Image: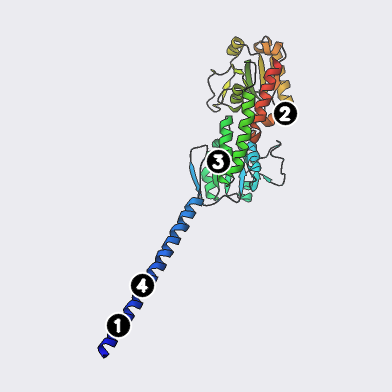
Amino acid sequence: MKKVLILIIFLTLLCALAACSQESNTSTAKEKAQQTDEKQESQTNTIEITDASGQKLTFEEAPTSIATLDSGVLDILQALDANLTGRPTSSGPAATKNDKITEIGNPHQPNFELIAKVNPEVLVVPISFKQYEDKMKQQGIQLVYTKANSIEDIQDSIHTFGTLLGKEKSAKKINQSISDKIDKIKNSDAPNARTLLVYGAPGTYLAALPSSLSGDLLEKAGGKNIAADFPKEEKFPQYASISPEKIIKKNPEIIMLITHGDPEGVKQAFQKEMNQNATWKNLDAVKNDRVIVLPSHLFGSNPGTKVAEALQIMQENLTEAN
């Protein structure tokens, strides 16, 4: 009887131990499953983008502060409600939208002291800024490169920043609005006028090529870029030196002037050049007073979300000059 009792007690303890072991295994399995879910969720929330330079960047979360040296990028980031800590030093409409944001210079003259002061997590810059990449990394600032040589480039930037900021829906809505406006403009009639796009600065005149933003806009607006086969400048591959012989031969019907600032000053200087230089005097565009100064905030720099407006103005000028 005593042996039977001992056996019963032993079996009871064995069952209890087995139950505890099973419960422990179940708990461990649940913990592992939870950890796996958390890891997968973390991986799902990771933000991955590819910028204009081709570099692939990964962020654990959307940056809480961002700055830029480009007025068009500023316009895009403001449209996406980003937390901006630094903006380009500029007089353009996008730059003055919020004058409480610290000015940090421009791509040609960055103010490194102020960039360090605002200390953004991300600084959006053109590819030409690569020479300062190591300097920024030492300060813990991640560079994101951008370009705006076509409408497609600008829409790619909007998509990229939407992904970076977790504002994909807003970015998609902005891009759809731009695409709808562009489709209407491209489908309307416009004269295929022979056009010379001149980028003007004091003492310097260059012809904008189709690979530039203004060249892309001209093509989509229905104009014909007479400088399409001009050899590109080594330092400015979207532009070409103005060849008097080729210009006379191709005889533009319209000349459009592009400038970063002081459009009237550039126009007066260019008109003086035309009056003194026989290259220009006999061109159809000059004889018929079809020399147009394009708005600097839309053509002198990246127009950002207003790129469709720039295309509209380009086409209107082609039509009115006809």
What's the amino acid at mark 2?
A: Asp
> What's the residue at 36%, 70% (across, down)?
22
N-terminal label among 1 and 4: 1
- Asked whether residue 97 is in view, the answer is yes
CA–CA distance in space, label 4 to label 2:
82 Å
Q: Which mark is residue 262?
A: 2
**Cα distance in 3D space between marks 1 and 4:** 16 Å
* Callout 1–callout 4 Cβ contact below 8 Å: no
Residue 206 appears in the rendering: no
Q: Residues within 10 Å of mark 2 (few under 14, many from 20)?
A: few
Query: Which comes sooner in the sequence, label 1 or label 2?
Result: 1
**Disc 3 marks which residue?**
160
Q: Are marks 4 and 2 in contact (CB under 8 Å)?
A: no
Q: Locate residue 314, reporting x and y percent.
A: 66, 23
Can you identify the residue that label 1 sits on? 10
Question: Could you say which quadrant of the image residue 211 lies in?
Answer: top right
Q: Nearer the viewer, residue 58 or 155?
A: 155
Q: Nearer the viewer, mark 1 or mark 2?
A: 1
Please tell me whether residue 71 is drawn above or below residue 246 in the rendered image: below
Q: Are marks 1 and 3 in contact (CB under 8 Å)?
A: no
The residue that disc 4 covers is 21
Q: Secondary structure at mark 4?
A: helix
User: Which of disc 2 and disc 3 is earlier in sequence?
Assistant: 3
Q: Amino acid at mark 1?
A: Phe
